[in-house]
Image: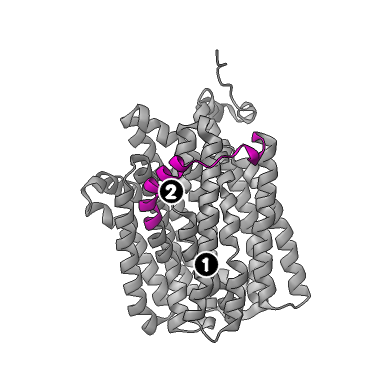
Amino acid sequence: MTPAPTDRLWVRYLPSFLRKRFEDRHVFQEAVENSGWLFADKILRMGVGLLVGVWVARYLGPALFGQISYAGSLIGMVGAVAGLGLDSIVIRELVHRPDKCGEILGTTFILKFFAGIMSYFFVVGLVFVLRPDDTIAHAIVAILGWSLTVNALDVIDFWFQSKVLSKYVVIARNFGFIVSAIGRVILILAKTSVVSFAVMNLVELSLGAIALLYVYSLKNGSVRKWRVRLSIATNLLRTGWPVLLAGIISMVGLRIDQVILGQLADSKEVGIYAAAVRVAEVWFFIPSAVIASVFPSIIRAKEVDEAEFYNRLQKLYNVLAFVGYAVAVPVTFLAGIIIHLLYGKAYATAAPMLVILIWSDLFINLAMARGTFLLAMNWTWILFWVNVASAVVNIALNFFLIPKYGGVGAAAASCISYWISAHAICYVFKPLRRNGSMITHSLLLPKFW
């Protein structure tokens, strides 16, 4: 007989009025604790990472910083292919079929590893086509591109997410992060080239992957238990390829602005825009942490109680809308000060870009939550077409606005396309109209509960 779950230790130390809300709500406690670890991870990265990242941006200057940002955007877009759209699907399978854990993880790793190798050679060829005379971009992409294969070990992260045990992933990855942060400071003091910073980015991912392997071995045994099964590979690819296409389109929509800006403007404008993007994206850890913690419980609720499923989904929309407003409103008024304090006069024109981009975060939050709904319903084709519509609008607006307004035009294109993807498109697809109303409600009455 399975023993009844007990309250988490930290619940006992809460004030009485809070303790009553948490007691005997074990799924909620699990999600809160998991979110706490993810928040701690991202806050550390936001503090140390932003500090060191800003120092790197100041040291390199807008032009060289634009070079490394351009390369990162190219790799980010191709990385969607290397991921094969399997992330959420694998987590869902691990929740549903824990007895097949070794086979699911082993098969997923092999699929992602070979997809990463093919993606690496593709992105190296792509940068030669787009920038045939830019040897610095060639070198940076050739180095950073290996991250596409290292990321195959993310399958271990999926296992921890399925168990709502993200603290082990946080500990492992922060090992690589801290070492690389120290390494970047040393590179700045030694006045090294921009290529050396690309090497350090790859070192961070590699050390994080090694540490992840170690903590996995402590919790679940050796990777020797992993097995490759053709039937599982076929099932994952059959289920995942609509999500893969959606992921490719989504990542194109997310990173294409810097690529187009790099082609139509110059590396300096890319660097200034990338500075604004870096500040705007600092807050992404909040929706990511919340969704990672509640996704398994939303899936379970769908299987048992439809009303509770939609109730949890509405709460997720409410929380993420509240978070979006809580970040966007103050940053709107403080953008100029933030950019000046962080990056200095060389990046001053990033302030208006940040004002626009920070509002796109609100819609990104809601789009991520709506993506959770689509995956829970297994409506992957709708997810694909939603992302197609958003990407087409984004690309069209980028080509129209960038020649006239530069980075500000790229920011406006992103914000409009994210609103369409998260909200407006819900009223186009009939199955999403209920979600459209739920999102409207969250935009008008956001709540942090």
Question: Residue at the spot x=68%, y=39% of the render?
Answer: 217
Residue that label 1 marks: 75
Where does label 2 land, which residue? 320
Rendering coords of residue 377 (x, y %): 33, 40
Q: Main secondary structure of the magenta part?
A: helix
Element type at marker 1?
A: helix
Badge 2: few (under 14), some or many (20 or more) residues near its Cα, within 10 Å?
many
Percent position (x, y) of residue 208?
A: 67, 53
Colour scheme of the picture: one colour
Residue 274 drawn at (x, y percent): 53, 72
Image quarter in which the C terminus is found: top left
Quick check: is 232 in the magenta stretch?
yes
The boundaries of the magenta stretch are 220-246
Among numbered discs 1 and 2, the one appearing first in the sequence: 1
Tell me the kind of residue under disc 2. Leu
> Looking at the image, can residue 345 be seen?
no
